[in-house]
Image (spheres, rainbow, N blue to C red):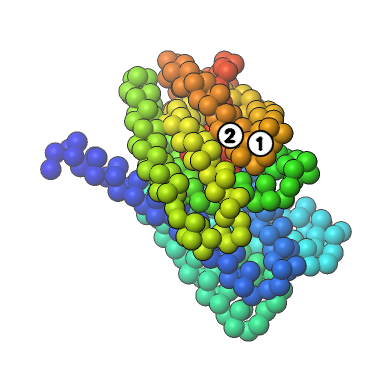
Amino acid sequence: MTRRQSGILRLARRAGWSVVDQALSSLGSLLLSVMVARAVDAHAFGAFTVSFAVYSVAVLVSRALVSQPLTITFAGADPATYRVASGRSTGAAVVVGIAVGLVVLLVGVLIGGPVGTALGAVALVLPGLLVQDAWRVAFLAGGHAERAALVSAVWIALQLSAVAALTAAGAGSPAPYLLAWGLAAAAAAVLGAVRGGTRPLVTQTRSWVRENWQLTRFLVLESLLVQGAFQGMLLLIGAFGALSDVAAIRGANVVVGPVSLLGMSATAFAVPELARRAHLPGRTRLLAGVGISGVLAVVALAWGAVVLLLPDVAGVALLGDSWPGVRAVLLATVVGQLINISYSGATYVVYSTGATAVAMRINALVSVLLVVFGLTGLALGGAEGVAWGIAATYATVLPLWYLAAARVTRRPAAGQPRPAGGEPDGAAAGPAVDEQSPADGRGLSAGRTTSD
């Protein structure tokens, strides 16, 4: 086997493990939700859903604030430097978990009732949950996706065993399930520390955040902007339209979920791989992004054809009474996802260079267009109009992402490996470009829909 063939094989192996890890993580969340839904009443499950949403936001902030520098800046660092950086990143995740957990705990006490109790439970285990996620990011960015998959597998095995035991014992409150879920994550995080060869360096949190602020401030802002815009759009649709319209949009996103899963896996794999190859000519990296987009688009097109041909009996079996509404918006949703994923490779190129300010400006445009086009679509055509409005958002920004990718590859990458503690290249801020990010709220999650 030639050196080139060996390199391609290693690359394919890492890509495969990235998909496995993302699939395990998503499957764990899905199975947890299903098992809790079966074990508690509707009101208690609502409290669980609120707590899970809080966790989702906390993960979003933690990744942007303390984990993504590993993906962008340290992906090509030597093992010793990367090990220290991993310890600093996971240590910062502990602090973020404690800080956010205290706020959530206070809110839970003030709210009281089942929701307050559930929030209190999630607050107690939030540090473990965020550190487990931080180790996944560290392994993926460091080229050890098999370790990330191992951490995810252990987490799933422990949480499902605990949840099954609680179900057998007749637990009817979401709090025990949330505690079991979080404690399982903490145990998996310990395994992550063992496999990573370092403990979380909590005392270096301030320096880690300060040194990477040039990158992370834009990542945090863009994540909150796009997710806030998408969720706000859904709330407005529910207020001015009907809850059935919201259900149709969410149901359609469930149907195209496998492609979204692939997109998230591609993000976790492609951004660090491109970042550690910052020495390659800009044209080569740009063509790599185009190639990735092409592969993902073919998969999205194939899956879209499958779901559009899905018989109604299968749709009803999957989504019940919601299927007729989902069927009405499915074509627009498939088209939107196809457009969205067609520029995912360009987003990977932009993020891999550390040009987070450029990406943030695009995502700011996305957040505005989501609301404007979504509500315009609602007025013109109900839920189907909303879905076409989302697709129009993606179509508007598609050329902007490729323009941005072409521009940032003409200058030195901000994501060049640097010693732990070094300052990021000021080029990360980049010039203002009329770019956009996968409107599905992706940021560094290109290739998925905002509601994922």
Q: Identify whether 251 is placed above or below 404.
A: below
Which of the two labelled residues, at mark 1 and mark 2, occupies the earlier sequence position?
Answer: 1
Mark 2 neighbour class, 10 Å CA radius: few under 14, some 14 to 19, many 20 or more = many
Mark 1: amino acid: Gly
Q: Residue 264, image x and y in percent?
A: 47, 44
Residue at 65% from the left image edge and 51% from the top image edge:
247
Q: Residue 430, image x and y in percent?
A: 55, 18
Which residue is the site of mark 1?
381
Q: Identify whether 237 is placed above or below 109.
A: above
Q: Nearer the viewer, residue 1 or 42?
A: 42
Image quarter hosting the N terminus: top left
Mark 2: amino acid: Trp
Q: Identify whether 410 is placed above or below 33.
A: above
Q: Gap in Å between the C-alphas at discs 1 and 2? A: 9 Å
Q: Nearer the viewer, residue 160 or 321?
A: 321
Which residue is the site of mark 2?
388
What SS does tag 1 mark?
helix
Q: Nearer the viewer, residue 107 or 397?
A: 397
- Residue at the extreme bottom of the image, as rendered: 169
Q: Nearer the viewer, mark 1 or mark 2?
A: 1
Residue at 18% from the left image edge and 39% from the top image edge:
5
- The image quarter in which residue 171 lies: bottom right
Tell me if label 1 and label 2 are in contact, CB under 8 Å: yes
Q: In the rendered view, does 155 fall on the left or right side of 195?
A: right
Q: Residue 216, image x and y in percent?
A: 60, 34
